[in-house]
Image (spheres, helix red, strand yellow):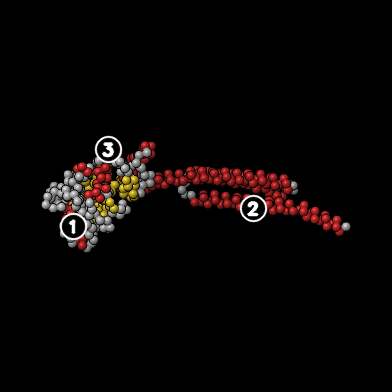
Amino acid sequence: MSLAILICFIILTVDSIPSIHSHNKVHSRLRRREFVQEEVRKSMLNYMTSIKGEITDIVIEEMIGYYNSQRMKLYYLENEVSNIKNSSLPIRNTSRILRNLAERLLKEQQSVALNLSSMEYKIKNLTTVLHNVLNDLHQQQKPVQHVRRLVSAKQSAQNHQASIDCDDVFSQQLSPVREGIFRIKPRFATESFDVKCIFENNIGWTVIQRRINGTIDFYRRWNDYKNGFGDLQSEFWLGNEKIHQLTVQGRYILRIDLQPWNAPMRIAEYGKFSVDNENENYKLLISQFRSNISTAGDSLSPSWDSANGIPFSTYDRDLDNLFYDNCALTYHGAWWFTNCFQSHLNGAYIRSPLALQNTARNGLHWSTYDLYHSMKATTIRIRRQNTFETNH
């Protein structure tokens, strides 16, 4: 009798093991589903919070509607699972149903993830457009200037053409910065090259020279000035060949910014500027000094000693107007020298207070401002005169 009872007990125990194991699996899957549900809800709420204020009401309504529909689907699935859990269906049928529910949950999760990715892409695009519109409104750009930028950007994208100068770069920037380094390719250049651009008053200026601290030696040979040298982030000479390739493609304005050691910024601007090719020794063509806006005076084309038509000169290629002297050698630089010069912005960098005590032709010199003053900083930049047209 005891043996029979023992055998029955063992049989009942063995039969109950799969049921307990399956019941634990059900609870485990339910916990994972509830965790996934909560994570989806949290992710969607966090994402909506992060983009609050950057998208329009229509996008918010779309997201809320989509979230509600997904929440209802998950709610119905939860009810189904709850009903199954409380039912007395055989464990075998329950396992099959739970497996089907798990597959449906996985498909719903994948669908949610796919739709979220699509909505995220749309939101990013919308946010970018809104950001650009706000920038344009903030900068109070004139409609014609805004249209010019959009048309030029569209044409450039269609033609896959590189910018020809910094004004062209500006027209293609949806969110322009104040300055930066950009890649350009002038129309008649065989290769593209980097330039420093300054964007002011809806105009892109191409910088061809900059002096700020004396870290770069400007006492160099002809080939150095031909090809360019220095660092576009600090001090540099862009290169006579590049300057020629820029100015040969249209009519360019020249602006020179002069920063004295002991006074506010001064400028000199010319309505016409270009540099000839190497066969002409990079001859300077300069005219139309703009006295109405210039505050430093005209030291490039004064009637008593104009550099207009003068070739470029370096210490190893003496092309100045003095047969008995080499201006580049004597004054440690390179420029369009006359007798020797009224201006010389590629001279030796002299730090204050010595900059205020030097002889007339030492340092970064601009005679119509101060004969005995070497500048603290200089920037030479150019732009096309008519930014709404391109010259062929």
Residue 19 image position (x, y, % from top left): 74, 51
The residue shown at (65%, 48%) is 78
Q: Earlier in the sequence, mark 2 or mark 3?
A: 2
Residue 45 image position (x, y, % from top left): 54, 50
Q: Amino acid at mark 1?
A: Asn
Residue 72 showing in the rendered view:
no
Between marks 2 and 1 in the image, the one whose residue lies nearer the viewer: 1
Q: Amino acid at mark 3?
A: Asn
The residue shown at (73%, 53%) is 20
**Residue where numbered disc 3 is placed:** 391
**Residue where numbered disc 1 is placed:** 362
Q: Quadrant of the N terminus?
A: bottom right
Crowding at dot 2, Cα within 10 Å, few <14 / some 14-19 / many 20+, comes out as few
Apparent side of residue 26 relative to residue 335 in the rendered image (left or right): right
Q: Amino acid at mark 2?
A: Arg
Between marks 3 and 1 in the image, the one whose residue lies nearer the viewer: 1
Q: Quadrant of the C terminus?
A: top left
The residue shown at (46%, 46%) is 124
Q: Who is closer to the viewer here, 234 or 52?
A: 234
Residue 208 image position (x, y, % from top left): 27, 48
Apparent side of residue 216 relative to residue 54 in the rendered image (left or right): left
Q: Earlier in the sequence, mark 3 or mark 1?
A: 1
Question: Under tag 2, what secondary structure?
Answer: helix
**Residue where numbered disc 2 is placed:** 31
Asked whether the beta carbons under mark 3 and mark 1 sit within 8 Å of each other, the answer is no
Crowding at dot 3, Cα within 10 Å, few <14 / some 14-19 / many 20+, comes out as few
Residue 89 image position (x, y, % from top left): 74, 47
Q: Earlier in the sequence, mark 2 or mark 1?
A: 2
Labelled disc at residue 7: none
Q: Which residue is outermost to the bottom?
A: 353
The residue shown at (77%, 52%) is 15
